[in-house]
């Protein structure tokens, strides 16, 4: 079986080239062609030796994910549905803003955490994505958008691992993908502009702090264990005290001097003044000095069978005012892409209905050659 070069960070690609008898600088050249220029045809890579260009199609390929669908919101948000095989699909969302372009990337097909307010969790868990499948979302989006917008410079300035799945439960694939995102020979993003969101996998938070500390966002959603146990089942394994201790350990190496806490506003569940006051007390006193943080309040995006409703705007603002009055930096996330089910917590609400249809997948795979842009000599 030939290797998909999207699966390699630069060190991995250098080791692969060495096995072919090539010098490391060839790996750097390949890396730039793949990630900076979006090339998938080795014949295009004109600064590679002809002998290497002729050799590569028999031992490797550059294969992105087939696109099942593309939707664009009235606010400019774009959502792609990618086929990852065996009836599974993942969603990737591009959010354009005046000063940035953010890509929300998936790390798993489905999610095993099962947060009560998240439609992906209701879908269930299928499998982890490979490094190449994580990077293929960025590779496709970046170079597709450059062509769409008619520009050569970078379109995606920020990546958030906030799509489908719990990134830290797929750490072995996540870590090399992050390395590629940060590598100056690839996408060249700063650690401040790459964010990993977690529901609180404490031991792996510590590993990330040691290996590659990027910006960290923690799905909090409750000010006490009793409430959080029912919203984020992982809390039963890693309760709030352990989670906040891990945040304190992360802060000294974090690229920003704060942790972002995500808090989904649920009507009558976690949105009362007493919840806000308890949240202030928790964050400002934990560990004797509190946790340097920013609170991101997220209006809940309803989906079928959740049994939950979004807090009213007035309640959200009241909650925010309690936090702000106590000196906690707080923002209310603007909902983006909700008309195409691309808003926070909505991803994959009906993915299974769309992707389990054998006829649909068969039709997609029949047009695979047009979608993949891969020369047949380089595919497996």
Image (cartoon, rainbow, N blue to C red):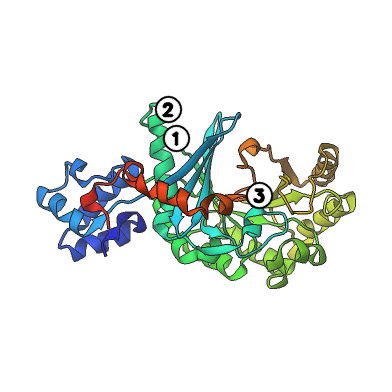
Measured as percent of width and height from the top left, residue 197 is found at 59, 55
For residue 247, what is the image quadrant?
bottom right
In the rendered image, which quarter contains the N terminus?
A: bottom left
Q: CA distance from mark 2 to mark 1?
A: 9 Å
In the rendered image, which quarter contains the C terminus?
A: bottom left
Which of 176/234 is in front? 234
State the SS at label 2.
Answer: helix
**Contact between labelled residues 1 and 2, with CB atoms less than 8 Å apart:** yes
Which of 154/109 is in front? 109
Residue identifier under label 3:
345
Measured as percent of width and height from the top left, residue 118 is found at 68, 54
Nearer to us: label 2 or label 1: 2
Work out whether 220 lies above or below 267: below
Instruction: Identify the mark at residue 149; answer none if there is no mark.
Output: 2
Disc 3 crowd rating (10 Å Cα; few below 14, some 14-19, many 20+) is many
Disc 2 crowd rating (10 Å Cα; few below 14, some 14-19, many 20+) is few
Q: CA distance from mark 3 to mark 2?
A: 28 Å
Q: Is residue 176 left or right of residue 299?
A: left
Measured as percent of width and height from the top left, residue 10 is found at 32, 56
Residue identifier under label 1:
155
For residue 232, what is the image quadrant?
bottom right
Measured as percent of width and height from the top left, residue 175 is found at 45, 61
Task: Indicate which disc, 3 or 1, sits on the residue closer to the N terminus.
Answer: 1
Q: Is residue 305 left or right of residue 64?
A: right
Seen as rendered, the residue at the extreme bottom is 237
For residue 155, what is the image quadrant?
top left
Work out whether 63 lies above or below 12: above
């Amino acid at each position: 079986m030939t290797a998909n070069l999207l699966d390699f960070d630069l060190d991995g690609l250098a080791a692969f080239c060495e096995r072919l008898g090539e010098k490391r600088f060839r790996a750097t050249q390949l890396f730039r062609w793949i990630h900076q220029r979006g090339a998938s045809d080795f014949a295009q890579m004109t600064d590679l030796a002809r002998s290497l260009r002729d050799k590569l199609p028999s031992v490797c390929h550059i294969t992105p994910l087939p696109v099942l669908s593309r939707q664009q919101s009235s606010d400019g948000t774009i959502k792609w549905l990618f086929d990852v095989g065996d009836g599974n699909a993942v969603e990737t969302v591009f959010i354009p803003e005046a000063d940035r372009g953010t890509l929300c990337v998936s790390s798993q097909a489905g999610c095993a955490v099962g947060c009560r307010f998240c439609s992906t969790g209701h879908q269930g868990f299928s499998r982890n994505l490979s490094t190449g499948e994580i990077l293929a979302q960025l590779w496709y989006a970046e170079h597709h958008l450059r062509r769409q917008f008619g520009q050569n410079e970078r379109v995606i300035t920020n990546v958030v691992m906030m799509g489908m799945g719990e990134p830290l439960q797929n750490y072995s694939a996540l870590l090399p993908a992050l390395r590629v995102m940060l590598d100056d020979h690839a996408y060249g993003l700063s650690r401040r502009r790459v964010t990993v969101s977690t529901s609180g996998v404490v031991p792996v938070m510590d590993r990330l702090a040691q290996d590659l500390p990027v910006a960290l966002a923690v799905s909090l959603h409750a000010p006490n264990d009793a409430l959080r146990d029912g919203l984020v089942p992982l809390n039963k394994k890693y309760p709030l005290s352990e989670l906040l201790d891990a945040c304190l350990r992360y802060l000294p190496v974090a690229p920003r001097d704060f942790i972002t806490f995500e808090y989904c506003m649920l009507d009558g569940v976690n949105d009362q003044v007493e919840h806000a006051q308890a949240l202030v007390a928790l964050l400002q006193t934990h560990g004797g000095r509190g946790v340097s943080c920013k609170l991101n309040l997220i209006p809940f995006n309803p989906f079928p069978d959740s049994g939950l409703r979004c807090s009213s705007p007035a309640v959200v603002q009241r909650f925010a005012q309690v936090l702000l009055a106590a000196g906690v930096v707080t923002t209310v996330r603007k909902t983006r892409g909700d008309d195409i089910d691309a808003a926070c917590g909505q991803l994959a609400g009906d993915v299974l209905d769309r992707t389990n249809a054998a006829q649909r997948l068969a039709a997609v795979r029949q047009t695979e050659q047009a979608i993949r842009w891969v020369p047949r000599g380089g595919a497996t």
